[in-house]
Image (spheres, grey):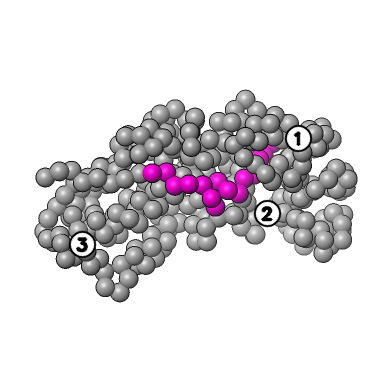
């Protein structure tokens, strides 16, 4: 995966950090899972408890880094005396060989925390890298790359943060922060008009409403009823172009379905406001990062 944005060492602007409460429990659960009932048998049997060591976390391939504070918290959860010195910030692009962080502390604790810390750092950096790739492919258009609710259970806040680190934006975080009337809702409700009427009777005036439409007829019905956004699902390039023209700025347009590195550029060129992509959170490959101890 070749990432073209942002520049090497450049951080994504205005990237607000995660609060520790958003990842503390997930990190604790991951460490507990790894330690099991007996603890780190290998490290406990081979590493003297008094021994201190230092090492370097470095990128082994190009990408965009995310999750440094999560990695820092992982090491600190095992031993609070571990020093974690991040050399870059989340959202920074790296090349193979670039140093991401230097760590120092009890050798046993470093080894015990290593895999969980790198799991988080590699996965979140992979999400950020995949996002940055699509952002680069849509440069010069109005379209923004957004994620979906197709996230790893328990890691939604982290994965959506990683999307932001890669230059993307977030769709709704859950079922409770916006209304998205999808095809199955419409199948039960009977029509776009019926679904919208029911929603407006039941949600507050500050709640945004989006409707998924599969064809131009449904789009016209949604526009006639008035919506905040339309999700143009699995439409062809010609259909998307026509749909954007018919909307004419009356609401936000979102393209979804079949988004790849090759198709995202032409889709963005249709003039849609958003392009939602599920695989950047559920299927992006991990960025290869490694921890190497310094030789004695």
Mark 1: few, some, or many residues within 10 Å (few <14, many ≥20)? some
Which residue is identified by label 1?
237
Q: Which mark is residue 178?
A: 2
Q: Is residue 273 left or right of residue 22?
A: right
Of residue 165 and residue 95, the one placed in the foreground of this image is: 95
Mark 2: few, some, or many residues within 10 Å (few <14, many ≥20)? some
Q: Relative to 217, does residue 203 appear above or below in the rendering?
A: below
Q: Position of residue 67 (x, y in %)?
A: 41, 47
Residue found 80% across the figure and 34% down from its top: 238
Residue found 48% across the figure and 42% down from its top: 128
- Alpha carbon separation for disc pair 3 and 2: 48 Å
Q: Which residues are magenta?
A: 273-288
Residue 280 shown in magenta: yes
Q: Relative to 250, does residue 41 appear above or below in the rendering?
A: below
Which residue is identified by label 3?
43
Residue contact at pointers 3 and 2, CB within 8 angstroms: no
Whether residue 244 is visible to the viewer of this picture, yes or no, is: no
Whether residue 114 is visible to the viewer of this picture, yes or no, is: yes
Which picture quadrant has residue 50? bottom left
Q: Position of residue 249 (x, y in %)?
A: 78, 34
């Amino acid at each position: 995966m070749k990432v073209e944005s942002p520049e090497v060492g450049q951080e994504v602007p205005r990237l607000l950090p995660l609060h520790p409460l958003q990842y503390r429990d997930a990190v604790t659960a991951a460490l507990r899972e790894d330690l099991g009932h007996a603890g780190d048998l290998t490290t406990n049997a081979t590493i003297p408890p008094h021994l201190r060591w230092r090492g370097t976390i470095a990128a082994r391939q190009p990408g965009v880094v995310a999750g440094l504070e999560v990695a820092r918290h992982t090491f600190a959860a095992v031993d609070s005396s571990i020093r974690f010195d991040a050399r870059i910030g989340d959202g920074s692009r790296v090349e193979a060989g670039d140093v991401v962080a230097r760590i120092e502390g009890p050798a046993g604790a470093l080894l015990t925390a290593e895999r969980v810390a790198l799991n988080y750092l590699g996965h979140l950096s992979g999400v950020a890298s995949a996002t940055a790739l699509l952002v680069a492919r849509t440069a010069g258009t109005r379209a923004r790359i957004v994620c979906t609710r197709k996230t790893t259970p328990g890691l939604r806040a982290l994965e959506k943060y990683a999307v932001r680190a890669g230059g993307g934006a977030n769709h709704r975080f859950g079922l409770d922060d916006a209304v998205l009337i999808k095809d199955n809702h419409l199948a039960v409700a009977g029509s776009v008009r019926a679904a919208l009427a029911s929603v407006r009777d039941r949600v507050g005036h500050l709640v945004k409403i989006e409707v998924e439409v599969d064809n131009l007829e449904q789009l016209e019905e949604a526009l006639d009823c008035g919506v905040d956004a339309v999700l143009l699902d699995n439409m062809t390039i010609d259909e998307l172009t026509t749909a954007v023209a018919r909307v004419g700025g009356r609401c936000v347009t979102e393209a979804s379905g079949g988004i790849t590195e090759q198709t995202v550029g032409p889709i963005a060129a249709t003039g849609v406001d958003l392009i939602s992509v599920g695989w950047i959170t559920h299927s992006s490959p991990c960025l290869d990062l490694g921890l190497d101890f310094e030789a004695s």
